[in-house]
Amino acid sequence: MNSAAVSTRNDMPVAATPYWRPAEHFAHAVQFYADDTLLVEELSRFIGTALGAGDAAVVIATKAHRDRLAQRMQSRGFDTARALEQGRYIAMDAAETMATFMVDNWPDAALFTATIGNVLGQAAAAAGGTNPHISAFGEMVALLWKQGNPEGAVRLEQLWNNLARIYPMSLRCAYPMSGFDREAHEELFLKICAEHSHVIPVESYTALVSDEQRLRSISLLQQKAQALETEMAERKQVEEALRRTQAELESIVEHRTSALRRLSLRLLRLQDTERRRIARELHDSLGQYLVGLKINVEMIRQSPGSEALWSEAEQLMERCMAEVRTLSYLLHPPTMDAAGFASAARWYVEGFGHRSGVNVTVEAPDQLGRFPDAVELALFRVLQEALTNVHRHSGASAAQVSIREDAGQVILEIRDNGRGIPEALLAHFQATGGGMGVGLAGIRERAWELAGRVRIESDSAGTLVAVAIPLRPTANMSDNSLEGWPPVASVLDGIGQD
């Protein structure tokens, strides 16, 4: 029998003739195959040679392979029925046999020796003669590999080798080569080969009849392997470059997003500062001018014959002063500095109802205390933005404003009875923060700046905008850190629910 290793002839390397003929006593061969037909053909030679020599044969295979083997043996003139009667031919189902010795998905050595040893003992006794011999073929290892238990397959190969030291036999097992189609299979593939004395390659190699053809085939496989290794190395380099590029892009996006968010917050703060300045200027400058103008008009009105003209002028002055006062208060209500957010909210809601025609009510406990200036200003701007949206977009006839303090947080809710926000538009805003104008985006940014949370619910019955802002931060506001803040989300889970 030729060795499966590369031999030399006249000092020239020659590819070894593949081992696929009947093995010598005590050999353990593994066959890798791509075509079931050629597997059955080689198996019929292996088993047929044993039966023809008066030896015993044991086949533990799938039903499909057992049936095809029986047909092939009969077509070659072997009387398998007589061999079965004599007990020299034993055919068993691979899955059923394997189930007798598997414990927790692992081959049990004692059960395997008892089960398979009993079968081999019967076959050896039936073979008779002074030197009884058994040719055994098994597919149980292939089933374990197919089931995703390669370690179990290697262990079963080792148990077969242990039995080969007890019973005079030649072993052969087979694996479909399609099961070894991943780079990760290499180590286990080598372990399987190491448990065998002979390895039979797939048909594309065993079909070659000359050393020259086999050398060419080996050289081609070596070239393909080298090309594959090179391609894999290049692919790893490309993947690594892509990972670095992706990391750099993510860093850039994160940096720019953070910068845009900081810019947005900066603009909001500048806007609030400018509103406060304009409100003060309107009150202290233009307001005083109008007061002085009114006094002058009053003095002129007392002149004879100008009562009607100056009465009309006085009315215009009163309107101008009222408009300036209202504009000043809207920009920054002085009542908030003096009495807090709840008072400013009631004042704003009253004026909003007169201007818009929407019936708005405010619910706030009488004992509601003062909040930090930044929190009160943010809540007032949220109230303005939310009610402006109610007036412009909802078509609502009524709205309800609720202010309360709970678990170290101040919670502001604005609910209306309008037409609601389209579901797709609301989902897009919740996912991306865009698509609904600057009003709701501004509400989200103001809450985020103070480590707060925003919740928006909407259907055909109306819309709820809820904002919760912590009152006892332990980190710098500019860090926007949530560590040490009260659990805002747990409170928001109940906002707007009856």
Image (cartoon, rainbow, N blue to C red):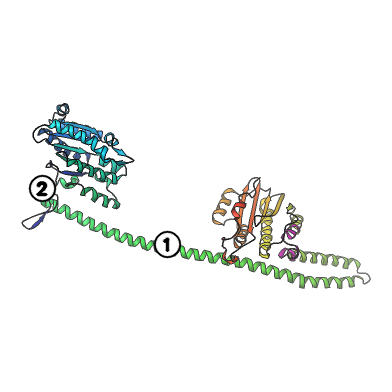
Residue 244, given in percent of the width and then of the height, sits at: 40, 64
Residue 77, given in percent of the width and then of the height, sits at: 12, 30
* Residue drawn at (14%, 45%) of the image: 19
- What stretch of residues is rendered in magenta? 328-346
Which circle marks residue 116 in the picture?
none
What residue is pinned by disc 1?
Answer: 246
Name the element at disc 2. loop
* Foreground residue among 86 and 402: 86
What residue is pinned by disc 2?
Answer: 2
**Residue 338 magenta-drawn?**
yes
Residue 328, given in percent of the width and then of the height, sits at: 74, 66
* Residue drawn at (60%, 49%) of the image: 422
Name the element at disc 1. helix
* Residue drawn at (26%, 52%) of the image: 187
| The quadrant where residue 267 appears | bottom right
**Residue 496 magenta-drawn?**
no
Give the mark, 2 or 1, whose residue is nearer the N terminus: 2
> Dot 2 surroundings within 10 Å: few (below 14), some, or many (20 or more)?
few
Circle 2: residue type: Asn
Circle 1: residue type: Gln
Q: Nearer the viewer, mark 2 or mark 1?
A: 2
In what quadrant of the picture does the C terminus appear?
top right
Looking at the image, the residue that sits furthest to the right is 304
**How far is the residue under mark 2 from the one under mark 1?**
55 Å
Q: Is residue 406 left or right of residue 27?
A: right
* Foreground residue among 85 and 465: 85
> Dot 1 surroundings within 10 Å: few (below 14), some, or many (20 or more)?
few
* Foreground residue among 428 and 368: 368
